[in-house]
């Protein structure tokens, strides 16, 4: 038990240190230095060691939250100018893909350019493509993502799995990350969980083509593990940009990872599900992930209750 505790703490500390150095490498502002104190690990059960670790984790979370808030404010500002989005989003949906690729080709340079002040704090120019652009379309975002190598998940993937669906959808679903089927087909939610999601959508009288479906991460994590904080933080800006373009009325977050990445909450999905929350003026309904419902079908009933509320809200029958 004691050994296990120390092992777990060591792994947490190492993860945190790796994550902090990754953020610092990206030039993310406000992330404090973090060094692994090897001597502290064997005495992992000492309360002060745990407190030090928790403080470091809290400071990383705080920096991330501040950066994410700055980013989402800009995204919301851009959403306040709907006309150009609307026109160009519909154009891309209709398959009129004449649009010039906006992302400039970057010539290799001997020295990396200095970090710049941006929406996400100080970042190096290699991350410019994750920033929102004025009047962008879904296609612009997907071009920016390209054959992404921004985080280590690219190493194990076959395909980047971008979001799909109606570009002006009233309802959006957000999951965690692609699984094996999605990775093979380059489409979100096409495996068993996806088939259940289709049924959930149909149960509220909609079709898959009517909604917009995406994930926090676009590359399949090894062994379908949960994406790390760093992996989620790297990929999430693209999801936020898609939300700004599509501007759904309701976002259903499927499971803990999606919920915690979109909303500022420490609570788990079991507690949070079934109540409308807010993301920048958009109603957000947390519910169970379909993969969890496949493991525990008795929870489908609660998911159905949550989806009925979504239907009622979209029908304007009820104020929430
Ligand atoms: N699970 C997810 O979270 N996303 C998918 O695309 C498929 C399964």
Image (spheres, rainbow, N blue to C red):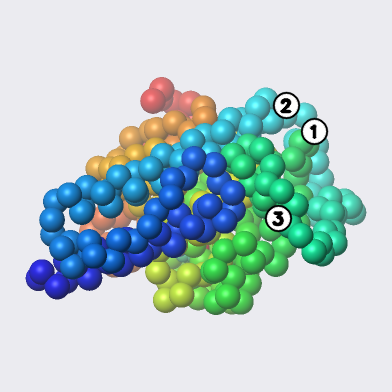
Q: Distance between the residues labelled 2 and 1?
A: 7 Å
Residue where numbered disc 3 is placed: 126
The label shown at residue 81 is 2
- Front label number (2 vs 3): 3
Q: Earlier in the sequence, mark 2 or mark 3?
A: 2
Name the quarter where the N terminus is drawn.
bottom left
Nearest the camera: 87 or 139? Answer: 139
Residue at image x 38%, y 33%? Answer: 276
Residue at image x 34%, y 48%? Answer: 56
Measured as percent of width and height from the top left, residue 33 is found at: 43, 50
**Quick check: can you spot residue 166?**
no
**Residue found at the far top of this picture:** 319
Nearest the camera: 319 or 22? Answer: 22
Residue where numbered disc 1 is placed: 84
Measured as percent of width and height from the top left, residue 136 is found at: 76, 42
Q: Image check: 98 left or right of 223?
A: right
The quarter of the picture where residue 39 lies is bottom left
Q: Which of marks 1 and 3 is nearer the N terminus?
A: 1
Name the quarter where the C terminus is drawn.
top left
**Quick check: can you spot residue 148?**
yes
Vertical arrangement, residue 164 with respect to residue 307, above or below = below
Measured as percent of width and height from the top left, residue 10 is found at: 27, 66
The quarter of the picture where residue 104 lies is bottom right
Q: Distance between the residues labelled 1 and 3?
A: 27 Å
Residue at image x 76%, y 36%? Answer: 134
Element under label 1?
Answer: helix
Q: How crowded is mark 2: few (under 14 residues within 10 Å), some or many (20 or more)?
A: few
Element under label 3?
Answer: helix
């Amino acid at each position: 038990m004691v050994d296990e505790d120390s092992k777990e703490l060591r792994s947490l500390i190492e993860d945190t240190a790796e994550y902090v150095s990754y953020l610092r490498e990206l030039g993310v502002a406000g992330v404090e230095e973090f060094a692994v104190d090897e001597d502290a690990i064997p005495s992992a059960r000492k309360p002060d060691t745990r407190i030090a670790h928790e403080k470091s984790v809290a400071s990383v979370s705080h920096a991330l939250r501040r950066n994410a808030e700055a980013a989402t404010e800009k995204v919301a500002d851009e959403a306040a100018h709907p006309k150009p989005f609307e026109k160009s989003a519909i154009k891309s949906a209709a398959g009129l893909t004449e649009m010039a690729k906006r992302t400039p080709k970057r010539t290799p340079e001997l020295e990396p350019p200095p970090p710049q002040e941006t929406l996400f704090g100080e970042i190096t120019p290699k991350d410019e493509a994750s920033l929102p652009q004025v009047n962008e379309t879904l296609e612009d975002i997907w071009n920016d993502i390209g054959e992404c190598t921004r985080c280590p998940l690219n190493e194990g993937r076959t395909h980047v799995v971008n979001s799909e669906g109606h570009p002006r959808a009233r309802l959006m679903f957000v999951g965690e990350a692609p699984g094996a089927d999605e990775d093979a087909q380059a489409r979100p939610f096409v495996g068993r969980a996806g088939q259940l999601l289709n049924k959930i959508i149909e149960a509220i009288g909609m079709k898959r083509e009517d909604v917009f479906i995406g994930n926090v991460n676009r590359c399949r994590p090894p062994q379908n593990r949960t994406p790390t904080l760093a992996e989620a933080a790297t990929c999430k800006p693209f999801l936020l940009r898609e939300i700004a373009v599509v501007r759904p009325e309701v976002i259903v977050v499927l499971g803990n990872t999606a919920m915690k990445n979109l909303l500022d909450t420490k609570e788990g999905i079991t507690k949070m599900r079934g109540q409308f929350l807010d993301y920048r003026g958009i109603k957000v309904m947390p519910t169970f992930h379909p993969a969890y419902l496949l493991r525990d079908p008795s929870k489908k009933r609660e998911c159905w209750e949550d989806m009925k509320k979504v239907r009622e809200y979209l029908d304007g029958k009820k104020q929430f």
